[in-house]
Image (tube, helix red, strand yellow):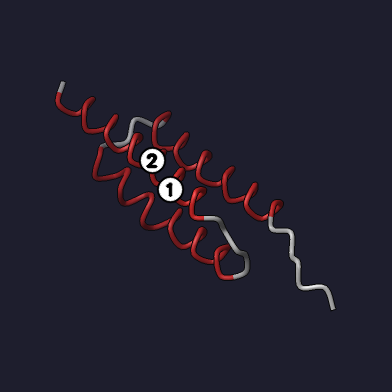
């Protein structure tokens, strides 16, 4: 039995999911609170489900966090104007 699983396809799909929801938040002019609600309601459950069945490297989760943090910081900066 081979226990070396290749999770690259699943990780790529999760990378695309993070990018898609980040794009949705930015292009639809959501407020900072709407952006956080969007991420918590739609993105987080989808990522959690994918992470149950794959072994995602910590570096990828850190990258996702940085991308989402950048999106929220951008929304906050635009809200201050």
Disc 2 versus disc 1: distance between alpha carbons?
6 Å
- Labelled disc at residue 66: 2
Q: Along the line of sight, which residue is nearer the eye, 60 or 33?
A: 60
Which element type, helix, strand or loop, lies under badge 1? helix
Quadrant assignment, res 81? top left
Classify 77 as above or below 48: above
- Labelled disc at residue 8: none
Query: What residue appears at the point 41 percent right and 38 percent down from the top-left corner?
Result: 67
- Residue at the far bottom in the pictured view: 1
Classify 2 as above or below 32: below
Classify 43 as above or below 30: below
- Residue at the far left in the pictured view: 80
How many marks on residues?
A: 2
Q: Dot 1: few (<14), some (14–19), or many (≥20) neighbours within 10 Å? A: few
Q: Along the line of sight, which residue is nearer the eye, 16 or 1?
A: 1
Contact between labelled residues 1 and 2, with CB atoms less than 8 Å apart? yes
- Name the spot of residue 22 as percent of width and height, x first: 44, 38
Residue under label 1, please give it. Answer: 62
Query: What residue appears at the point 69 percent right and 52 percent down from the top-left corner?
Result: 8
């Amino acid at each position: 039995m081979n226990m070396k699983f290749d999770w690259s396809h699943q990780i790529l799909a999760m990378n695309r999911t993070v990018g898609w929801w980040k794009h949705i938040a930015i292009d639809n002019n959501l407020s900072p609170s709407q952006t956080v609600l969007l991420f918590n309601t739609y993105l987080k459950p989808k990522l959690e489900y994918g992470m149950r069945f794959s072994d995602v490297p910590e570096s990828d989760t850190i990258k996702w966090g940085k991308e989402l943090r950048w999106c929220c910081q951008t929304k906050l900066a635009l809200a201050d104007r």
